[in-house]
Amino acid sequence: MRASFAERLVRAGAVVLLSFSLAGCGLFGGDDRYKPTPLASFLPGLTAQVDWKTQIGSGSGLGFAPTVVESTVFAATPDGAVAKIDLQTGGVVWRTLVDKRLSAGAGSDGKVTAVVTREGTVVALDETGQVKWRAQATSDVSVPPIVGYGVVVVRSGDYRIQAFNAETGDRIWSVQRPGPALALRAPARMVMLEGLVVTAIPGGKLLGINAVSGDIQWEGIVAVAKGSTDLERVIDVVGAPVILGQVMCAVSYQGRIVCFDIAAGGRPAWFKDFSSLAGLALNAQYVYAPNQTDVVSALKIQDGSVAWTQEALQNRKLTGPAAFGAAVALGDFEGVVHFLAQEDGRMLARTSVGGGAIRSPLLSTPQGVLVQTGDGALVMLALK
């Protein structure tokens, strides 16, 4: 029995796409209710400072998220830049410019690093950053690929999850499920867990797929679509599934937060109605998530009851959170990273990393909180 969670995508062609801003729904539009909350002063409880900053390339996008493998970071930017960075110092191990504009990256197991071009070409790089092979996905890709167990896996806009041999680039399996009329374009990621590819498919479902054979091992429901119109029925898992011990949690847009009990065969332990555009983080006590208007909540991991909410960042288009030390970190549309106290949600620290809107999820690492900025840099933030 296996676990699973997270993502959401875009169908090309016959599908209508919803943008991250959801302008068609009025979210973040001209209505004063959706204007970003101005930043208020507060008494800092911690100090956030830049430990190191390294430029990868330029630009950002929903399909980009850095990958940490032991002591190194792999990252990519839309202009075709891909880099391997020392996690502790920010030093560049190698940097490569792929000769195509990219739509997603970077996935890596430390030996093979994968990115995807806007034309749906999967590009694999070897340990030195040289192109190892190229292969064609069945359509566009806007979810970062994952690499492990000898495969490179992508999720394409036609709702296919495809695996390529990490050494040769040969396609070895493909899984497809029917998709809804509308799908959400928001941050989404796959994860690999104990030989399983854990992914979501539009419509609020999660799959656990054997990475080697492509056999579906587990299927779960995060949320069920409601409403009478296609727009009302848009429902998608956002961010990545997060696993801690025997618990896995995921969140959806216009749906729920659900935590699954792995020891009980992956059955839901609890769920709570919730709508997010960003994703979640968790620790041993709480699940943290911003809702679709960026009110941040902490839910008790045992039963889903609300421990606290923080409205000071409302409508600031927050990223997926990262739990680090005693804080929860979230980036916003102005390139500002906010640190909230895990126990009660009060503001602890704030710092600007620049570069405009942060669109990639923040990552918690042993060194600090890793941020991929809107202008294509990696920044390591330490808390004092």
Image: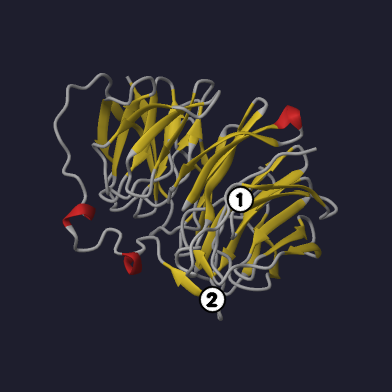
x, y percent for residue 177: 71, 64
Identified by mark 1, the residue type is: Gly
- Vertical order, 78 against 304 (above or below): below
On the image, numbered disc 2 is attached to which residue?
15
* Left or right, residue 290 beside residue 172: left
- Vertical order, 322 against 375 (above or below): above
x, y percent for residue 77: 46, 58
* Left or right, residue 41 beside residue 238: left
Q: CA distance from mark 2 to mark 1?
A: 27 Å
- Vertical order, 23 against 328 (above or below): below
x, y percent for residue 96: 54, 57
On the image, numbered disc 1 is attached to which residue?
107
The residue that appears at 54% across and 26% down in the rendered structure is 303
Q: Dot 2, crowdedness within 10 Å: few (<14), some or many (≥20)?
A: some
Disc 2 is placed on an element classified as: loop
Q: Nearer the viewer, residue 313 or 354?
A: 313
Q: Nearer the viewer, mark 2 or mark 1?
A: 2
- Tally of numbered tags: 2
The residue that appears at 50% across and 62% down in the rendered structure is 234
Q: Nearer the viewer, residue 99 or 217?
A: 217
Query: Which quadrant is the N terminus positioned in?
Result: top right
Q: Earlier in the sequence, mark 2 or mark 1?
A: 2
Disc 1 is placed on an element classified as: strand
The residue that appears at 36% across and 63% down in the rendered structure is 22
Q: How is the image coloured?
A: secondary structure
x, y percent for residue 125: 65, 56
Query: Which quadrant is the C terminus positioned in?
Result: top left
* Left or right, residue 125 beside residue 20: right
Q: Dot 1, crowdedness within 10 Å: few (<14), some or many (≥20)?
A: many
Identified by mark 2, the residue type is: Val
Residue 201 appears in the picture as rendered: yes
Identify the residue at the far front of this view: 228
